[in-house]
Amino acid sequence: KPAKSPDPPAKSSPTPEPKETGPTNTKLAETRLGLAGVLKLISGDKDEMKTLLNEVILMEPSLHDPYIELGELCRGTMEAVDVYDRFPFSEPLTFDDAYIYGEIVQVLMKLEAYDDPRLEKALVGYGSVMGWNSLDSYVRKLENVYKTAVLRNVYCAVNKKNAEDWDVQQFFKVKMW
């Protein structure tokens, strides 16, 4: 039997012909959020992740996840507080809302930004969901820096009490607020 000759070399064209593509998928908040998560795992490109998460926030402003993820990228900075503060909270507050409020409180207390007006609002939001006792360590820190006006306002808001009530006034006296 004669030996079989090898296949002739394939002809290569200098430039590939462009393939036709179909319509592009519409941008969805869920897919953008997923893509940001993949970027976090693969490349860690923070700028691209921030862009995607901001797109999700524009598409679905009441979705908690993009604020949380974007806040994590800016962890421990005022930029994180600015991100969390953009969230549109609505009544009744949920545990997810409490998480965001808790992050605001944590960062502001760590940075000792006791005069930031967002601190009082965040303490009230967090305490309203989690209860007054959950604020104990923050209350002690604020007592140590004499932020009694903030403490009074937060106590009344969290416990749904009037500052002029006799029992509240007695409590304030005992606490020396």
Image (cartoon, grey):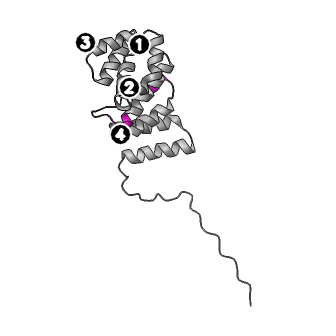
In what element is the residue under mark 4?
Answer: loop
Crowdedness near tag 2: few (<14), some (14–19) or many (≥20) residues, C-alpha within 10 Å? some
The three-letter code of the residue at mark 2 reads Trp
Q: Which residue is mark 2?
A: 132
Q: Is residue 78 visible?
A: no
Labelled pair 4, 1 in contact (Cβ < 8 Å): no
Instruction: Say whether disc 2 or disc 3 marks the residue closer to the N-terminus.
Output: 2
Labelled pair 1, 3 in contact (Cβ < 8 Å): no
Above or below, comparing residue 85 to residue 142 in the picture: below
Q: Position of residue 88 (x, y in %)?
A: 31, 31
Bounds of the magenta segment: 75-97
Q: Which image quadrant is residue 96 in?
A: top left
Measure the alpha-carbon separation of dots 2 and 3: 19 Å
Nearest to the observer: residue 130 or residue 19? 130
In what element is the residue under mark 3?
Answer: loop
Measure the alpha-carbon separation of dots 1 and 3: 24 Å
Measure the alpha-carbon separation of dots 4 and 1: 29 Å
Callout in the foreground (1, 3): 3
Crowdedness near tag 3: few (<14), some (14–19) or many (≥20) residues, C-alpha within 10 Å? few
Nearest to the observer: residue 59 or residue 95? 95
Q: Which residue is mark 4?
A: 63
